């Protein structure tokens, strides 16, 4: 199984911005994720239009079942 952290923000114009991190560790807390997201808002270095507001975050857990061909 793989865990993906998805973080959602809004920019100054209200447009939604998202970013995903693959293979995150189990047991992430809201405090850890909020600190990460607030750091991204404070830095804003990787976005053409930087995020200004936190919207949501979620961990998506996926599993893969191989299919014999």
Image (cartoon, rainbow, N blue to C red):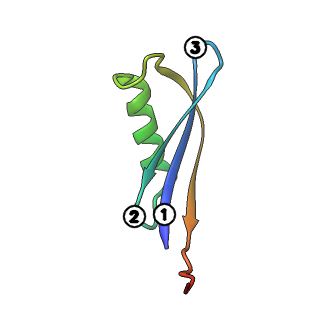
Q: Which residue is mark 3?
A: 12
What element does badge 2 sit on?
Answer: loop
Q: Classify 10 Å Cα crowding around label 1: few (below 14), some (14-19), many (20 and above).
A: some
| Crowd around label 2: few <14 · some 14–19 · many ≥20 (10 Å) | few
Q: Where on the picture, by quarter, is residue 47?
A: top left
Residue occupied by mark 1: 3
As measured in the structure, the alpha-carbon distance from the residue carrying label 3 to the one carrying label 2 is 31 Å
Relative vertical location of residue 3 with respect to residue 15 in this rendering, above or below: below
* Residue located farthest toward the bottom when viewing the structure as drawn: 68
| Residue at 40%, 61% in the rendered image | 23
Residue 30's place in the image compared with 49, above or below, is below
Other-residue count near label 3 (Cα within 10 Å), few / some / many at <14 / 14–19 / ≥20: few
Sooner in the amino-acid sequence: mark 3 or mark 2: 3
Is the residue under label 1 in contact with that under label 2 (CB below 8 Å)? yes
Q: Which circle marks residue 25 in the picture?
A: 2
Label disc, if present, on residue 55 of the rendered structure = none
Looking at the picture, tell me which residue is in the foreground, 39 or 61: 61
Determine whether 19 is above or below 32 in the image: above
Residue 54: where, in percent of width, then height? 56, 32
Q: Label 3 vs label 1: CA separation?
A: 30 Å
Provide the secondary structure element on which disc 1 rests. Answer: strand
Quadrant, the C terminus: bottom right
């Amino acid at each position: 199984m793989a865990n993906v952290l998805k973080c959602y923000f809004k920019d100054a114009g209200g447009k939604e911005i998202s970013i995903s991190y693959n293979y995150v560790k189990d047991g992430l807390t809201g405090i850890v994720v909020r600190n990460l997201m607030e750091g991204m808002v404070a830095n804003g270095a990787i976005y053409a239009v930087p995020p200004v507001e936190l919207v949501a975050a979620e961990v998506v857990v996926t599993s893969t079942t191989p299919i014999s061909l």
